[in-house]
Image (spheres, helix red, strand yellow):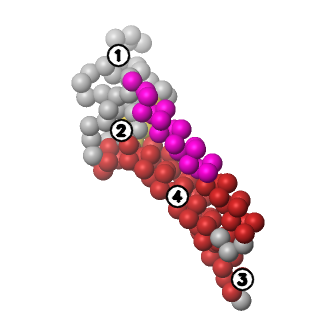
Amino acid sequence: MNDNLPDSNQPTLNRQQAPRELHPGFFWVVLLAWLWLVAAFWSAFAGDLQSAWMVTISTAFFGMYFGLSAILLGLQRDREPVHKSFLAYLKGRMDTFTGAVSGRGALVQVAIIPVSLALAGTGMAIVLAWVRGG
């Protein structure tokens, strides 16, 4: 076995190293998916006062969750800036602790849950509106 070959699991230390940080567009995708879910909840439950109160509480938790995350992200000093466009980032590769992953694969891993919940919430709101109307 040749010990001079680079280990494929270790990140390379050259100028062309894949970024280790998520592109800011990822956070916008997640944020928009959660906003979409909150909008679906408001459209489904705003007609009833008790339900609207529960959605108000959920909206407040949503604001605290993303507000605190944005504050903490802004306070991080050693964050590596990403100097690529969002589409270029999706076409490239990203370095992770366990190895490289494609930009699209990283987006799927980050956004699959919020986007799926937004789609499910929209479906439930549509069905609820259909049942109430007929």
Asked if marks 3 and 1 touch (Cβ < 8 Å), the reply is no
Quarter-of-image position of residue 41: bottom right
Residue placed at 61% from the left, 55% from the top?
59
Quarter-of-image position of residue 20: top left
Q: Earlier in the sequence, mark 2 or mark 4?
A: 4
Residue 75 coordinates in the image, percent (x, y) = 44, 28
The type of residue carrying mark 2 is: Arg
Name the residue that disc number 4 marks.
35
Within-10-Å neighbours for mark 2: few <14, some 14–19, many 20+: some
Name the residue that disc number 3 marks.
132
Asked if marks 2 and 4 touch (Cβ < 8 Å), the reply is no
Residue 89 visible in the picture: yes
Quadrant for the C terminus in the image? bottom right
Mark 4 or 1: the one toward you: 4
Residue 56 - label: none
Asked if marks 3 and 2 touch (Cβ < 8 Å), the reply is no
Image height check: is 107 above or below 119? above
**Would you say the magenta stretch is mainly helix, strand or loop?**
helix
Q: CA distance from mark 2 to mark 4?
A: 28 Å
Q: Secondary structure at mark 1?
A: loop
Image height check: is 46 above or below 60? below
Image height check: is 26 above or below 75? below
Q: Secondary structure at mark 2?
A: strand
Name the residue that disc number 2 marks.
93
Looking at the image, residue 89 sits to the left or right of residue 9; the answer is left
Q: Earlier in the sequence, mark 3 or mark 2?
A: 2
Looking at the image, residue 109 sits to the left or right of residue 86; the answer is right
